[in-house]
Image (cartoon, helix red, strand yellow):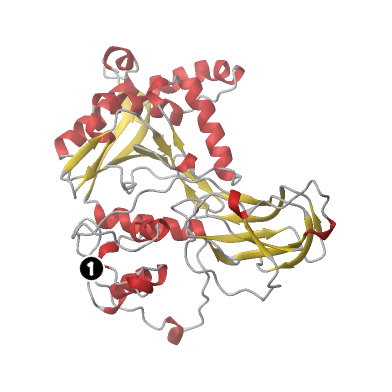
Amino acid sequence: MSTEFKLPSLGENIESVRVVAVSVKAGDTVQPEQTVIELETDKAMMELPVPIGGVVQAVYVKEEQDVVIGQLILTLDEARVAPAEKPVSPDTVPSQDPGPEPEPAQPVSTSASKVSIPTAVPVAPPTSDSNGELAPAAPSIRRFAREIGIDINTVKGSGSHGRISADDVKACAKKLNTGRAVPLSGGVQAVSLPPLPDFGKWGDIQRESMSPVRLKTARQMQLCWSQIPHVTQFNNADITELEALRKTYAKRAEAIGGKLTMAVMVVKVVAQALKKFPKFNASIDMEKKETILKEYINIGIAVKTERGLLVPVMRNVDKKNMIDISKEVIDIAGKARTGKVSMDDLTGGTFTITNLGSIGGTHFTPIVNYPEVAILGMGRSFVEAGFDAQGNCIPRTVLPLSLSYDHRLIDGAEGAAFLKWIVDAVQEPLILSLEG
């Protein structure tokens, strides 16, 4: 008996994935729960197992191919499967959004049964248009539209009964490059972009497809920059005394599994600052004309990986000590760099910290990670001349800090006060106990 395996729903924010490895071929025998392909989403790596065993009849995907939800992956011959290894009944598979129409695959036997690998995922309720009616689009299509800054209610669907597909959203977005303005979500009007010139007429060129991570980053940055009016303020923190304390307690932290770095100490300071300045731990709902103040503090840490920039999130940071934070930083950074970070690890942040200290540079202008309202950038520390109370010149270690924030919610004076509190707490750690 031939059984089809199709790509299951992987989450409401995932429309397509890229195949990075295919571990089976036609003729191979596989066991239940054996991984057959490895996938890369826009942020995470994941393995796709088969729930039953059998002999692979055909594989319909290849490495570096983009596949959509519902697309045929492979077919299995269950003739050699022991009676105990029965295929999953389609009746037991949870109801899932089918996603976009799958691409045509090679024909298979009409007698083949169809089994999707069950994956339980939360699905957000669809939003409604201005008339109170639901825009006819799947949750994954709505998410895609939000990510590239397109109001789903302005997209004209080409499907049955006006159903909106990913291609419809792309066609709407493409108008940005053809001299026509398109409304963005939140009522912001997009700036029309001219078409790109023919670069090839000046010399040889090469075109490379963006990786899922790079494409996600590009869309997110475009959304952040188009929706948030940025202001960036700079300040320097004298970390001479704090660095001495760090070195004093570094071995103690390592003895219990942590690593006390300046970044870890700044994370702790920022968590306390967010409690004192709750507006920086908020989001803006322009449609309802409300500010959403979050009573939890989840800090995202930007991590550079071979696949691009990822921002895993540490939860309830204000309730953790520096050793706990250092252990978690090591854990999430390791998972991000090895591709083992999950989608849950990448969501729910309320504030982001990005650290370029290990690379170089001083101040820079980090982009706020929508829908957050602020981000703190750390540059590379440096030594400069300072003077003590007696006027003696002594070396001081300085940490450059850059704070970007959403000027719709945060005024310049508030931004300066927030950054100054962080600088004071870094320079005088006792402030954490006095005011934190």
Residue 224 image position (x, y, % from top left): 31, 53
- Which SS class for mark 1? loop
At label 1, counting other C-alpha atoms closer than 10 Å, the crowd grade (few under 14, some 14-19, many 20 or more) is some
Q: Tell me the quadrant of the picture where the C terminus can be found.
A: top left
Residue 284 image position (x, y, % from top left): 22, 43
Q: Nearer the viewer, residue 310 or 255?
A: 310
| Left or right position of 99 against 147 | right
Residue 415 image position (x, y, % from top left): 21, 36
| Left or right position of 161 against 93 | left
Total numbered badges shown on the rendered structure: 1
Please say whether residue 358 is visible from this viewpoint: no
Q: Is residue 171 above or below residue 25?
A: below
**Residue pictured at 58% horizontal, 38% vertical:** 334
**Residue pictured at 33% horizontal, 43% vertical:** 363
**Residue pictured at 28% horizontal, 77% vertical:** 194
| Left or right position of 85 against 406 | right
| Left or right position of 143 against 71 | left
Q: Nearer the viewer, residue 317 or 344?
A: 344
Residue denoted by label 1: 191
Q: Tell me the quadrant of the picture where the N terminus can be found.
A: bottom right
Q: Is residue 357 above or below residue 308?
A: above
